[in-house]
Image: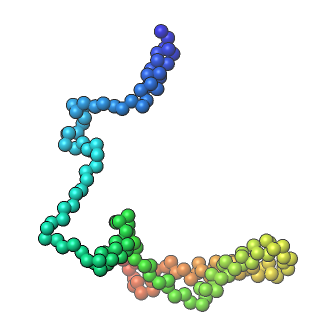
Amino acid sequence: MTPQSDEDEVWRQIVASFNDTAVRDSADQPWPDSENLPSEPPRRVVKQSDEDERPSAEELSDSDTDTEQADPDDEGHYVPPPPPPLPKTDTTTKIAWLALFGGPAYLLLSAALNWQLQGWMLFTAVAAFIGGFVALVVRMGDGPPNDSGWDDGAVI
């Protein structure tokens, strides 16, 4: 036999046993038998005691509205708290944001609608974009706070 025919035979065995289920002996398992899962899921039976009274029609209608509100599929679903309100911005910041997005938006709109731009319009749109960007960067304030004193150490 050639090495190729040996490989072909092994391949045929693999393909033939593809859908076969593996039968394991309990000695082959790396875990104890008590940890094996049952073949069918366990069923829960709730028995009603003799002391319980049957609910009235009013109680049944009330319980129907309660079950409609509490969806069992929604169990454990995280609902985040509402976000805090946005901080108030001053007029200068609002104008800088408007210039930052308004300049390119005007240029894009004029190009899409095939408007003829004069030189001063083009200059104003580009200057608004650059001015808005510079104003926002300058107002960012990444430096240390003014009341930090002489020590710029760790803040807890």
Q: Residue at x 44, y 79 (%)?
A: 83
**Residue nearest the observer in this picture, 154 or 131:** 131
Q: Quadrant of the C terminus?
A: bottom left
Residue drawn at point x = 40 percent, y = 83 percent:
148
User: How far across and how far down the image is residue 6, in percent?
Assistant: 46, 15
Which residue occupies the foreground of this view, 141 or 67?
A: 67
Q: Position of residue 133 (x, y in %)?
A: 64, 77
Residue at image x 23%, y 39%?
Answer: 31
Q: Residue furthest bottom?
A: 91
Residue 154 found in image quarter? bottom left
Q: Nearer the viewer, residue 63 or 89?
A: 63
Residue 136 can be seen, yes or no: yes
For the point 85% across and 80% down, the residue is 118
How many marks overall?
0
Q: Is residue 125 left or right of residue 153?
A: right
Q: Is residue 141 above or below residue 45?
A: below
Q: Is residue 21 above or below residue 69?
A: above
Residue 154 shows up from this direction: no
Residue 73: x, y in percent? 38, 64
Q: Position of residue 151 (x, y in %)?
A: 38, 80
For residue 36, which quarter of the picture? Answer: top left
Q: Residue furthest top?
A: 1
Which picture quadrant has residue 79? bottom left
Query: Is the image coloured rainbow, by chain, by secondary structure, or in one colour?
Result: rainbow
